[in-house]
Amino acid sequence: MNLEELRAQFPALETYVWLNSATAPPAARPVSEAIRRVIDEWESGAFAWQDWEGEAYATRSLFAELIGADADEVALASAVSYSASSVAASLPKGRVVVGAREFRSNFFPWLALRERGFEVVEVPATDRDVVTTDALIEALDGATVLVAISEVQSINGYRVDLPRLVDAAHDRGARVFVDVCQSLGALRHDVRASGVDYLAAHCYKWMCGTRGASWLYVSRDRLDELKPLTPSWKTPEDPYASYYGGAYEVPKAARKLDVSLAWFSWPGARAALDMLLALDREAVERRALELAEAFGEGARERGFEVTPVELPTQIVGVKVPDAHALRERLKEQRVVAAERGGFLRIGFHGFNTQDDLRAGLEALGSP
């Protein structure tokens, strides 16, 4: 599937200039068709719930392929907060470092560790509202057991140098938990290359899928450390062998962390992963980064303050006095963006085009 064929999968793009995949993209046909099929089966009485769960289990290897992992290192989760809480619950006592402007699903699970006697360090943002790689590294010391970060920060698209952060953390004996909700799908990620210990992703943003379907990657050398946060009938090696009583036996693979599955979400997630894996992912990333860079340059030329760039990112944060009013003005012109913390947040995916770039800049106007 090339990028023009990808764009054709999104009917809403015939009407809207969609620059808001950082919140959620419009529905792709394969995803909405998969969800409708499940609803039709439910409505007709063909209650094939184990088939729907089979599609969820199929995503384990598909997601592993997307990030360069092995399937037994991937757990099926419901949200990033569940994944972060699972890791937090199994950490040895020590010091945890987290960016002060993290999205709360990757923030509160770590702050809650203070109630268990952990020291939790919140790395402050600069005056331009970004938490830099250097600031995170400076906060690490020999007592640090984990640093948690989003590869691309939700509020304004700032992207940290993840491999450099991982190297610094590992040099001090610390683990790294990364939230890739604002990068994976548009940007590529290889867990072997980045070296992260834990990676959490949700399907409904740049991965073009549904809410309720999420994944947690656990590197093989960290698997034994983690205990199921919410043991359930999904915990055993074969959850369908028996639903009642029996011995509590935990698999050695990441599947021990699996949640009970939201049936209607996972067929949509399977369709989204199939679509992503049919693409040239390098081409998707290149398109997204080129458009974002051009938008940032265009916004600066018009006199706007734009989020500084440490590494190329597909999200641009434009600092404005009234982001809500600007977003509403763009909406009137069928340009869909978001407001976050005083920023107009603009995001570009592989399905966006030069026409979208021009329309976005024209709608932005001048300060």
Image (cartoon, rainbow, N blue to C red):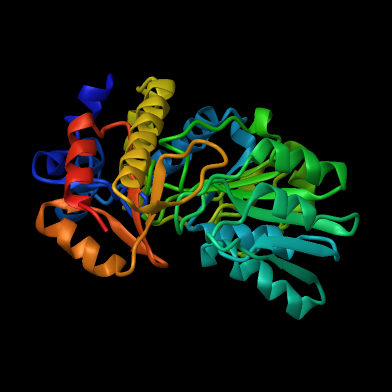
* Observer-nearest of 203 and 296: 296
Q: Residue at x 75, y 76 (%)?
A: 114
Query: Which picture quadrant has residue 197?
Result: top right
Residue 29 image position (x, y, % from top left) = 19, 38
Work out which residue is located at the far right of the displayed protein and give it: 142
Of the 4 image quadrants, the one containing the N terminus is top left
Left or right of residue 51: residue 108: right
Q: What is the count of numbered marks?
A: 0
Relative to 290, does residue 219 appear above or below in the rendering? below
Residue 363 is situated, as x and y percent measured from the top left of the image, at: 17, 50
Where does the C terminus fall, quadrant-wise?
Answer: bottom left
**Taking 310 as reference, is 7 above or below it?**
above
Residue 306 place in picture, x, y as percent:
42, 51
Q: Which residue is drawn at the image coordinates 63% and 36% (left, top)?
A: 72
Residue 83, image quadrant: bottom right
View extreme (bottom): residue: 115
Residue 62 visible in the current orientation: yes
- Above or below — where is 266 with respect to 107? above
* Above or below for 218 versus 274: below
Q: Is residue 294 left or right of residue 117?
A: left
Residue drawn at 71 percent across, 54 percent down: 135
From this viewpoint, is residue 249 visible? no
Horizontally, residue 282 falls left or right of residue 257, namely left
267 vs 344, nearest the viewer: 344
* Residue 74 point in image, percent of width and height: 59, 41
Q: Is residue 37 left or right of residue 315?
A: left
Location of residue 344 by image quarter: bottom left
